[in-house]
Structures are given as structure tokens and as C-alpha cells.
Amino acid sequence: VDSTHVPLGTIGERLPALAQLKLSGSNMPCIRELGTSLGALRVLWLSRCGLADLDGLGALPQLSELYLAFNDVSRLMPLQPLEQLQVLDLEANNVTSMDEVAWLQFLPSLQELTLRANPVADDATAAGGAFAPAVFALLPSLATLDDETRDEAAASAAAPGGADAAAAVGWAAADDECPSPATAGVAAAAPPT
């Protein structure tokens, strides 16, 4: 769906009880294009939509799952009104700082979060930081970060090689194109350049 040619603001008026909406792969630079009548929506998929602006999420108060992977989202403050949100996928966006991640503290129901392939996660890992433990400390209700539980993240950070080696091995296990665990461990142990 190309929101510049197809008006999406009337979907909620035509389907007032709509609970799930998949628009992944559409052209939608802003959430506001969905309008204000999707109050019953619980699950929304907007992956690969060219989305940069999350303003307007307050019109979706019942949202419990939001999938925004592979967009250009950098500001997380607009997520603040989503008190029912339990699952948030922000993989491969443009979140650059822990200050933005801190806005997620206002989501008391958040249980699952994906932030891999964002500058904030990549920079913290490259600098030898323990990104996962920092996010878990910031978000006490969070159970899973990047498909890793709180306990797994703590164990990875405490393992030989620390969080970097464990993260590199985790990436290798998740993606067949990544280096082998042995190679990943060597790469993670190398000093930053």
C-alpha cells in the first residue's frame, strides 16, 4: 500500500473492531497516516515501510504488539502512550542512544524488545559495553531482549569473553551467513580500532 495514493485514515471507520493490521512493505513515512479511528487495534505490522516518524501512536491505546523492523525510526518518545504494549520490534532502525531507549521505561507492560542492528546496540557492543544488561537494568519488566532472556544475557555477560563474545556467538547462531562461533569469538576479543 502506498499511503500517498491510498488513504489509510478511513480503515478504522470501515472496520471499527479491527484487531490486527499488516502493512509491512507499504510506503508509509508516518503513523499519523493511519488516522485516529483504530482504537481497537491490538497488533500492527509496519516493517519495511520507510517509516521515520512514530507521532500519532496515542491513537492506538490498545496496541499490545508493534512490529517496526527495517525502518528509519530514531525517536522513541512517541511510544510513551502505549501502556498496553508488550512486544516491540525495532530491529534495524536508527536508534542511536540509550537516552532514546530510556523512553521505553514508560511502557509498563513491555516484555519483549528487539533492538539488534540499531546504532545504539552496535556501538555499545563494539565499544566493549554490556548492552543487554544495561537495557535490562533500565527496563525491569522486560523479559526478552533480541531473543535473549534476562538470565541468558546475565550469563553471557559473565561468560569468558564477556558480552561481546556472547553476542557475536548469538549472531552466528541466528544467521547462517555470520562467521562461525570460533571466528566470532576471535573477532569479539580483538581490541577496538
Image (cartoon, rainbow, N blue to C red):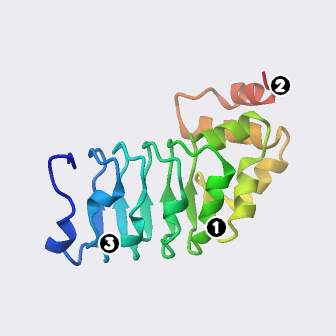
Q: Tell which tag, 3 or 2, sits nearer the viewer.
A: 3
The image shows residue 127, relative to residue 77, as above or below, that is above
Quote the CA–CA distance across marks 2 and 1.
Answer: 33 Å
Residue 144, horizontal then vertical, whole percent: 61, 60
Residue carrying label 2:
191
Q: Which mark is first along the chain, 1 or 3? A: 3
Q: Is residue 26 left or right of residue 185?
A: left
Q: State the mark number for residue 105.
A: 1
Disc 3 residue type? Leu
Q: Nearer the viewer, residue 3 or 122?
A: 3
Disc 1 residue type? Gln
Residue carrying label 3:
41
Quote the CA–CA distance across marks 3 and 1.
Answer: 22 Å
Q: Looking at the rendering, which quadrant does residue 192 occupy?
A: top right
Q: Tell which tag, 2 or 1, sits nearer the viewer.
A: 1
Asked if the residue at tag 2 contacts the one at tag 3, i.e. Cβ–Cβ closer than 8 Å, the answer is no
Q: Tell which tag, 3 or 1, sits nearer the viewer.
A: 1
Q: Secondary structure at mark 1?
A: helix
Q: Nearer the viewer, residue 139 or 97?
A: 97
Q: Which mark is first along the chain, 1 or 2? A: 1
Q: Residue at left 65%, top 71%?
A: 141
Quote the CA–CA distance across marks 3 and 2.
Answer: 47 Å
Q: Secondary structure at mark 2?
A: loop
Q: Is residue 26 visible?
A: yes
Q: How many marks?
A: 3
Q: Residue at left 36%, top 66%?
A: 43
Q: Is residue 182 left or right of residue 59?
A: right
Residue 109, horizontal then vertical, whole percent: 56, 74
Q: State the mark number for residue 180.
A: none
Asked if the residue at tag 1 contacts the one at tag 2, i.e. Cβ–Cβ closer than 8 Å, the answer is no
Are there few (<14), some (14-19), or many (20+) residues within 10 Å of tag 3?
Answer: many
